[in-house]
Image (cartoon, rainbow, N blue to C red):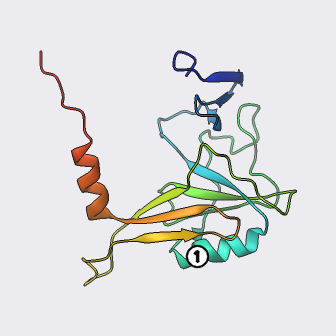
Amino acid sequence: MVKNGGTVVDAYGLVNVVSPSGLPMRGIVGLWPDPIMFCAINCAKVQESKAFYEQLGFVEQSYPYSRPGKGTGQFEPPQPKGSIYMSPSPNSMGVLLLPSKNKKITANPAVQGLNLVYTPSEGGEDDVGGRLTDPSGVGTNLEPYANFAAAEKSNRVARIEK
């Protein structure tokens, strides 16, 4: 992170950093590798945001922890008060809806939105996705899996064989 222009704010069990693009991030040193557990979203009205994500197939789930203490130890905080964790399934990445003290949410300019990859319903092969905005102003891009897979494949870096 530092080598590429980011800043480590502090690190003691939790690692608070600001990416080179200005996006604040928090990493938790866990017991098993999991690239990203959730995306935290400040919400003007948590219940309205919950209803929005429910329409996208998300359901309220147990808050995920990366350590066995489940927020009771010194290295991992408990679930924030008033927040709701939602994901499409218990073992997938989700969103943590955080109640904001401010009724007007100001988006971080380093984040353009949330990209959600989905499998179209049967007979929906021609589905092209779309762009929605959640109640707090977070742009949400819906991308069919076939489109995502094609873009990911075309952007792979060729592996150099020795």
Please indicate whether residue 86 sits to the left or right of residue 149 in the image. right
Residue 89 shows in the view: no
The residue carrying pointer 1 sits among few (fewer than 14), some (14 to 19) or many (20 or more) residues within 10 Å by Cα, namely some
Q: Is residue 10 above or below residue 111?
A: above
Kindly give the residue lying farthest to the front in the view shown. 109
Does residue 154 show up?
yes
The quarter in which the C terminus is drawn is top left
Count the labels in the image: 1
Left or right placement of residue 157 versus residue 131 in this view: left
Q: Secondary structure at mark 1?
A: helix
Which residue occupies 28% across, 61% down?
A: 147
Residue 12 location in percent, x, y?
Answer: 72, 23
- Residue 49: % across, % down: 68, 70
Query: Foreground: 159 or 91?
Result: 159
Q: Is residue 96 left or right of residue 1?
A: right
- Quarter of the image where the N terminus is located: top right
Where residue 68 appears, x then y in whole percent?
63, 41
Q: Is residue 159 above or below residue 120?
A: above
> Who's the residue at 43% across and 71% down the image?
130
User: In which image quadrant can residue 28 be found?
Assistant: top right
Q: Amino acid at mark 1?
A: Glu
Farthest left residue? 162
Q: Nearer the viewer, residue 106 or 117?
A: 106
The percent coordinates of residue 114 (x first, y second) are: 53, 57
Q: Give the residue drawn at x 45%, y 61%.
A: 116
Which residue is the site of mark 1? 54
